[in-house]
Image: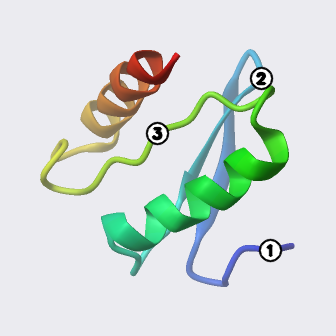
Amino acid sequence: EHLRDTDLAGYLNNGHFVVILTETGVEGASIVLWRALEVFASELDAAVVGYPADGDCFDALLEAAKARASQRT
């Protein structure tokens, strides 16, 4: 209910979700992530990646996000 009409959220598997903030740059997405971490810090393993800098397709972006999230822990 907090996403814009242009944003996408979906369930991947095993409790993993993806949120795509279309029309949002990495800086704006980082602010959204920071706010989510304030609320869900102990339950959230997340990262911000940008297209095309971090990957040119969904699978590449997902792998980049997984790698970046694992670096945070």
Q: Amino acid at mark 3?
A: Ala
Residue 16 location, quadrant: top right
Front tag of 3 and 1:
3
- What residue does disc 2 label? 15
**Is residue 60 shown left or right of residue 73?**
left
Q: Count how many numbered circles sit on residues in the image.
A: 3
- What residue does disc 3 label? 47
> Image height check: is 24 above or below 14?
below
* Disc nearer the start of the sequence (1/2): 1
Q: Which residue reaches farthest front? A: 38
Q: Position of residue 18 (x, y in %)?
A: 59, 43
Residue 58 location, quadrant: top left
> Image height check: is 56 above or below 41?
below
> Image height check: is 35 above or below 62?
below
**Is residue 41 shown left or right of residue 71?**
right
* Disc nearer the start of the sequence (3/1): 1
Q: Position of residue 41 (x, y in %)?
A: 75, 35
